[in-house]
Image (cartoon, coloured by chain):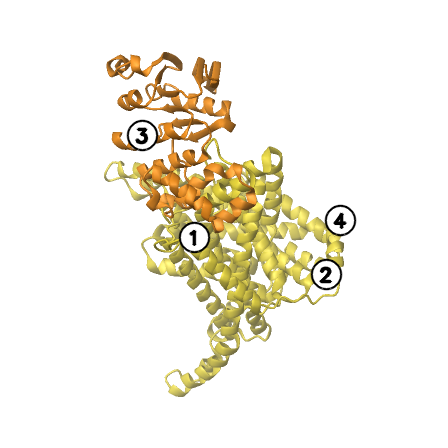
Chain colours: A yellow, B orange
Amino acid sequence: MHPAPAGLGYAAVSRRFAAVALVCLLVADLHVTTLHPLADLARLLGGLVRPDFLAVEIRSVVYTVAFAVLGVGLGVGAGFLLAVPFARSRPVRLACAGLRAVHELFWALLLMQVFGLSATTGILAIALPYAGICAKVYAEIVEEADLSALRVLPPGTGAVSAFLYARLPETAARMRDYTLYRLECGLRSSLVLGFIGLPTMGFYLESAFRQGRYAEAGALLAVFYALIGTRRLWVRGVTLPVLLVGAVLALPPAIGSADVGASLTRFLGHDIVPAPLRTGDPTSPETWARLWAWFAPILTGQILPGILQTLILAQIALVATGLGALLLFPLTARRFAGRLGRPLGRVLLVVVRSTPEYMLAYVGLQLLGPSMLPAILALALHNAGIVAYLMGRHADAIPYRPDAPRGLDLYAYETVPRLYGQFLAYLLYRWELILRESAIFGILGVATLGFYVDAAISELRLDVAVILIAATAALTVAVDALSRRLRRRLRIDDLPTRLSGPQRIPCAEPGGG
Amino acid sequence: MAEPAIALENASAAYGDRTILSGIDLTVRAGERVALMGRSGAGKSTLIGLIQARAPERVALVPQAAALVRPLSVFHNVYMGRLDRRSTLHNLCTLVRPARADVVAVEAVLARVGLSEKLWARAGELSGGQQQRVSVARALYNGRPVLVGDEPVSALDRAQGGTILAELAAGHETVIVALHDVALALAHTDRIVVLEAGRIALDAPARSLDPGRLAPYYAAA
């Protein structure tokens, strides 16, 4: 009765993703190993709603902001410069892809080997990946802008003048908005860096959660939400110089990094060079045989199982994110939540989106024990909050006909079908981000790639760690390419996917698709 | 005399402080076929909106833009005309697996607008004229007694437009349509209401009019 539509349809893609996720569920480890997860959760929530603000370590808040401001500042500056040659230069594009394919926690783990637990580590761990992301996004913003004014400039106008007069004004508002959004991300990244030892709020959150001081954790989280919620008040043109100078002055003193030059040389020239190559003669075939003998067990024992587990976790989390977003977005849409419900729904989703998923996963692992379940929940909750918030805004922009149905009929026949292309565009875009985060959750004990990276670093086998991180980056780039291909085949590749900015929220209905 | 299907008394409408319609007195009796005419910007669409809002439970609407859900099939778009008269559960099941009886009924309606072979095509893949006919089929399937249409045949040629208007007249007790084609209006309705600058400038039986009589309302202002 239903002839298959030509090409790839929304329904077919959704079914395939869901089917693969179901298969993944069968093989995933979803056991709850703790004895009283619900009682622990009740204690946790009880502490969170009775925050103990006196226990908050003020310096950790200052460091969190300082790392974020300087890291994002450096990353944004470098990204802005890299955006200029981005469209023309393939090497720049590849370098940026490499920078952003490595998660900031992996960068931090590597940088720590050279710079110790220092401010440099914290700032560079944020700045390096953010430079890669910002270069790409700024280049896209310039590309998408209406540049008709550029074509009517008098011939002979200098490149700088042309940029300042005809390009920047068109794009400045969106760049500023994206940069502010990046700072929000930077605050989350900065907090999470504390979980691996840097002196930001995450450090105190980790010990508070681990030792059950939930009132202190609640206070830290409340301070963090306040920081994020008020960012438009304290990040402004006039406060930027104050923030930057203040951040430099407030940085913590370095801990135990005596001679950076020497340790950098040792790190690059010795530590990350695969062990067989350090001593062997690179011209002799025997060295290469030893290299293969060194690499083969890493490939079969760590990279391949790590990739498999990472893909499984990301697949389940992606489909769970989609289901969660479809359930949650009516909370923020006028036709479903009403005038009173919608602001409440928005606050809920903004809180969910502001909570770093790494911290959610950490708390989940404390409550449920080490399995994929808490990681799935953390990823799905965080990402569903983001996608649902955006879908709510699109839903409010739909021009419904005057005699449109209501309630579940409206949802099933008008809203979801009209938004489905946009929904898939958001999900496929977030696939790569979910994958990156899935790999990172290995540090918490799930057997994804990060698990092996963390183990290699704690055994001081940095050569192995670098190989594993490179494998993670390659996997991320591959999934990104696959997502891009799928979006193009579904003809949803020109729909908005970023969540910053006063971007046009069109009624997302691509033709055909 | 038949019951009034729609009655507006001294109705007005404004967007912000800009008046679109004022002092509109319009009574349409059951069984009448009325054409709303006038230049673009005269207030036809606003009046259509007022009429629909007056009695939404008796109106089957053909909105100006076809307002189809493009990713859904033609069947589902037409079926939507009766969503409010089925249980939500039935509607949800129909999304996944339509019942045979519904398919037959929708197919019959589509045949009346010449689109039965497009039953399972995606609405977004149709041409503009086909989409408009799906929108008409949705109103026919809706079946409420008062058909209110805002330029329901604007994307069709005159012959096709005439057929569609005849189907609308056959399928609904009362018909109120905004039209810009004078010949179609004179041939397929029995009462012409002309709007000018937000007021009713002419309200007369179609047989008492000819194209020359209507021409002034379309000449450049």
Q: What secondary structure is marked by label 2?
A: helix
Query: Which residue does the numbered mark 4 point to in the structure image?
Result: A52
- Amino acid carrying label 3: it is Ser
Query: Which residue does the numbered mark 2 point to in the structure image?
Result: A37
Nearest the eye: A446 or A4? A4
Q: Residues within 10 Å of mark 1 (few under 14, many from 20)?
A: some
Could you tell me which residue is drawn at 37 percent across and 38 percent down?
B134
Do callouts 1 and 3 mark residues in contact (Cβ within 8 Å)?
no
Q: Relative to A131, is A164 on the left or the right?
A: left
Chain under disc 4: A
- Amino acid carrying label 2: it is Pro
Q: Are marks 4 and 1 on the same chain?
A: yes
Indicate whether A297 appears above or below A149.
below
Q: Relative to B210, is A405 on the left or the right?
A: right
Does residue A137 appear in this view?
yes
Q: Residues within 10 Å of mark 4 (few under 14, many from 20)?
A: some
State which tag comes first along the sequence, 1 or 2.
1
Examine the image and state in which quarter residue B33 appears: top left
Nearest the eye: A85 or A418? A418
Comparing marks 1 and 3, which lies closer to the viewer? 3
Residue A265 horizontal/vertical position (percent): 48, 71
State which tag comes first along the sequence, 4 or 1.
1
Could you tell me which residue is drawn at 37 percent across and 29 percent down?
B170
Q: Residues within 10 Å of mark 3 (few under 14, many from 20)?
A: some
Chain under disc 1: A
Query: Which residue does the numbered mark 3 point to in the structure image?
Result: B154
